[in-house]
Image: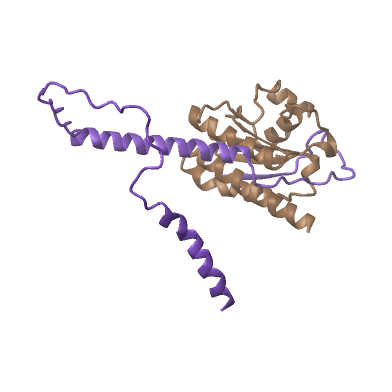
Chain colours: A purple, B brown
Amino acid sequence: MKLFALIVPLLCLAASPLVMAQSNEPIFQPSHNIATNTPTPSATPTAAPPAEPLPLGWQIAIGIGAVLAVAALLYGAIKAWRHANFFDRQYRFSVPPSAQLRFGGKRCGGKMGTIRF
Amino acid sequence: MKRMDRKYGKAPLHTRYLTDRAERLTIAELKKLREELHVFTKKFPQLLFSIFITELPPGGEVTEFAFWLANRAQFSPVEARGVENFDLLLALDPATKSAALTVGYGLEEILCEEDLSGALQAGAAAWNEGAIAAGLHASIDWMTEKLRELSRARTS
């Protein structure tokens, strides 16, 4: 009931300006004469010829072109995304304390996998 | 090493990620593989995965060549020796149909020989059919996944 009592006066207030603005007379009257339209010679209006629709071949070509452009854009974006490695984390390994250098190799000691295919 | 120096001569010209002296890859394949190896380095900033494709001289062994090249050619822009070296080098000879994957001292505790062979096995089927690039992609993917798995296991 309290809610109803609150809503009804609010609705009345909201509607009151509309009621007051129902007069037929405009509030502001122009103080000068309003220019009327200059009579023009009765020339027969020339209607523009209706535009011819694009041939079906052109429509298909434009459609294919648009699809190709979007595909190229998508391909480039995926490539850039992959290249940037945005959300893939980086992996690091701890450096081992020491290694026995073998066979005179200063970088690699000959640990390897091998295959014949 | 000196014996191998006599056998293979001076270290051949090479690039950081991928060298194709056997000319088995197209320009597009080279570009794509280099991009993939670059992404690998972004994932594993300490590591450098290099691939060297060549036709070995008569009497050459891919395992011996991989060991010699890993020590004689500097693939990383920073000179890393001993335990500081985290390089991976895949040497592949399409003529003798053999490949070897070797690692620097820094990775010896992390990757076992089965892991290295596993990466090569991943590419073997494609290499056998002459699809060198496809096999290399498979090897890189396999190694990426293995290193991720090993890194997670070590940190957890």
Camera sees residue A114: yes
Quick one: which residue is furthest to the right in this view? A97
- Find residue A66 and report its image quarter: top left
> Looking at the picture, how far across and down is residue B68, in whole percent?
73, 31
Give residue A61's quadrant in the image.
top left
* Foreground residue among B13 and B9: B13
B84 relative to A20, above or below: above
Q: Decide if residue A102 is in sight here.
A: no
Q: Where residue A36 appears, x then y in whole percent?
A: 25, 27
Task: In this rendered view, identify the residue nearer to me: B12 or A62.
Answer: A62
Q: Position of residue A35 (x, y in %)?
A: 28, 25
What residue sits 19% from the left and 37% below the top?
A: A56
Residue reaching furthest to the bottom: A1
Identify the residue at image location x=52%, y=26%: B23
Please state if A77 lies on the left or on the right of B52 as rendered.
left
Above or below, B122 against B79 in this view is below
Residue at 57% of width from left, 25% of height from top? B21
* A20 w.r.t. B100: above or below: below
Q: Is residue A21 above or below residue B100?
A: below
Q: Nearer the viewer, residue B135 or B17?
A: B17
Q: Quadrant of the N terminus of chain B?
A: top right
Viewport quadrant of the C terminus of chain B: bottom right
Residue B149 % position (x, y):
69, 54
